[in-house]
Amino acid sequence: MILRTIGLIATLAGGILTTPPPVQAQQPAKVPRIGLLSPFSPSVTARWHEAFRQGLRDLGWVEGKTISIEYRYAEGRSDRLPDLAAELVRLKVDIIVATVSTDALVAQKATRVIPIVMASTGDALASGLVESLARPGGNITGLTQMAPEMAGKRLELLKEIVPKLSRVAVLWNPQGRISTQSWNELQLPARELGVQLHSLEVRSPNDFDKAFEDATRARAGALAIMPNPVFAGNLKRIADLAAKHRLPSIFQLREFADAGGLVAYGPDRSDMFRRAATFVDKILKGAKPADLPVEQPTRFELVINLKTAKALGLTIPPSVLIRADEVIQ
C-alpha cells in the first residue's frame, strides 16, 4: 500500500515537471503590417495620413500596438515608386494603401496577391485599376475621385471670380494619365464658358519657370492646374509663381490655398483617407478586395485665400464666399 502510494506521487510529480507552463504555450498575436505608399513628401500628406491613423484608431487599430505602418515616400519623384512598391512586397505587408493613381498603378504591377486599398485615386475605372466600381475584381478596392469631371467645375469657379476672364493658362502633365484626362475633359466646359485655354505642358519642376513666362506672353488671365504629383509636390512654388505673374489660380488640394494659391476646390482628401481605414479594417477581418465596392467622395471643400485675392486686387463675389468651407484671411 505504501509502495503504491509512493509510486502514484512520483507519477504525478513527473507529470507536473514535464508539462510546460500554459503561459509558455501561448503564441503572441501577429501584428498586421500596412504599407503606406505615396508619390509625395511627408509634408504634403501629413494631414491625410493623420486622418488615416485616426480612422484606424476609431476602429480599434492603434499604430505601434495593434498595427504597424511602413511609410514609403517618393518625394515627388515618380520614378522611385517601383522600387518602393517592390520593397513593401518584399516586406510581405498585409495591405498596401496607395495615395493616388500614380502609385496605385505601380502597386498593381508590383503585386496581384497583396490587397491594395486606394485612398484617393483619380478615375480608377478609366485607369484600369478595377473592373467596375460595384465589383472591382482582383486585389484592389478603396476610394476613387472624380478628378476629370472636377476640372470643369474649377474652371466655372474661376469664371465666377473673374467674370471678364477670356483666356486661362492650364498646367498639365502629358505623362500623367489623370492629368491628361482632366485636360481633355476641360475642353467642353471652356467652350461653354467662352474661355480660351492655353496649354502649359509641365513634366518636371524644371519646366515651371518657362511655363509661367509662356502664360504671361499669352496674356492669360488666370491659371488652372490639373491633378498630378509634380504639381502636388510643388504647391508653394506654383503659388509663388502665380502671385509673381499676377495670375488668379485654382487647384484641387486645400493645401494649395494654404501655400498661397487663390482657390482650392476638390474632394476632402482627409475624409477619403479616414474612410480608407474602413477598407483596411474589413480586409484584415477577412473580406476580399474583389468583393468590396469602390466608393466615391461624399465631401468636397472650397478654400479661398483672401490675402492672395487682396494682393491680386481681386474682390471675391459674395456668392462664392458664402459657399466657402474655409476662408484664409
Image (cartoon, grey):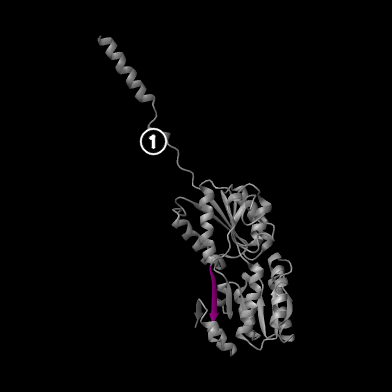
In terms of depth relative to the viewer, which is nearer, 114 or 36?
Answer: 114
**Camera sees residue 230:** no
Q: Main secondary structure of the magenta part?
A: strand
Residue shown at the point (53%, 62%) measured from the top left = 273
The tally of labels here is 1
Residue 255, given in percent of the width and then of the height, sits at: 56, 73
Q: Foreground residue, 178 or 189? A: 189
Neighbours of disc 1 within 10 Å: few (<14), some (14-19), many (20+): few
Residue 191 visible in the picture: yes
Q: Residue at x 73, y 77 (%)?
A: 200
User: From this viewpoint, which residue is outermost toward the bottom?
Assistant: 313
The magenta region covers: 299-305
Residue at numbered disc 1: 23
Residue 100: x, y in percent?
62, 62
State the image quarter where residue 130 is shown.
Answer: bottom right
In percent of the image, x 36 and y 25: which residue is there? 17
Q: Position of residue 248 (x, y in %)?
A: 62, 83
Q: Residue at x 54, y 52 (%)?
A: 34
- Can residue 239 be found in the magenta stretch? no
Q: Position of residue 42 (x, y in %)?
A: 56, 65
Q: In the shown orientation, is residue 4 left or right of residue 72?
A: left
- Label 1 sits on what residue type? Val
Tell me: residue 243, above or below residue 225: below
Q: Secondary structure at mark 1?
A: helix
Q: Quadrant of the N terminus?
A: top left
Up/down of 277 relative to 305, above or below: above
Q: Residue furthest left?
A: 2
